[in-house]
């Protein structure tokens, strides 16, 4: 007789998929990026995972949250370099995949608004 727990273990996503989801969630949390949902979902699908499975209420959400907490803490230790690194991999000009992580929307501005021309990057 197969139990629900046995079925979940047998059908568990690959560990790399869980780590990837946690990495993207941690980058959004620590760096303030927005997640490009379509691109994020497409990358998860390539790994055989549904976004709902790795979300907080999904069957593997608890595992992702544990990895997320560890990654968030590690990113926070060296925030500037971590945010630059993850943006270089998954940002609008990402060298792994583009537009998984998008710049944070400015408060009170439309989502497509750009910062003023004289705005200086955070240092």
Image: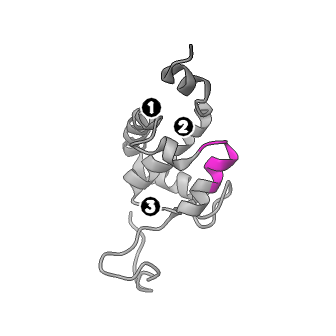
Disc ID at residue 63: 1
Where is mark 3, residue-wise? 33
Residue 40 position in % (x across, y down): 57, 55
Residue 37 position in % (x across, y down): 53, 61
Q: Nearer the viewer, mark 3 or mark 2?
A: 2
Tell me whether circle 1 and circle 2 mark residues in contact (CB < 8 Å): yes
Q: Nearer the viewer, mark 3 or mark 1?
A: 1
Q: Main secondary structure of the magenta part?
A: helix
Residue bounds of the magenta highlight: 42-49
Where is mark 2, residue-wise? 18
Residue 62 position in % (x across, y down): 40, 33
Q: Residue at horizontal 61%, vertical 48%? A: 44
**Label 1 element class:** helix
Within 10 angstroms of label 1, few (less than 14), some, or many (20 or more) residues?
some
CA–CA distance in space, label 3 to label 2: 19 Å
Q: Residue furthest bottom?
A: 117
Residue in the foreground of this view, choosing between 15 and 92: 15
Residue in the foreground of this view, choosing between 87 and 77: 87
Q: Residue at horizontal 56%, vertical 17%? A: 2
Tell me whether circle 3 and circle 2 mark residues in contact (CB < 8 Å): no
């Amino acid at each position: 007789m197969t139990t629900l727990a046995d079925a979940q273990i047998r059908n568990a996503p690959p560990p790399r998929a869980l780590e990837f989801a946690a990495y993207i969630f941690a980058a959004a949390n620590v760096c303030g990026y927005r997640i490009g949902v379509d691109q994020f979902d497409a990358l998860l699908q390539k790994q055989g995972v549904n976004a709902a499975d790795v979300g907080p209420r999904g069957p593997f959400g608890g595992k992702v949250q544990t990895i997320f907490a560890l990654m968030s803490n590690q990113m926070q230790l060296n925030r500037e370099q971590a945010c630059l690194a993850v943006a270089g991999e998954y940002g609008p000009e990402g060298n792994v995949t583009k537009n998984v992580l998008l710049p944070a929307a400015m408060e009170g501005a439309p989502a497509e608004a750009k910062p003023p021309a004289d705005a200086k990057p955070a240092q």
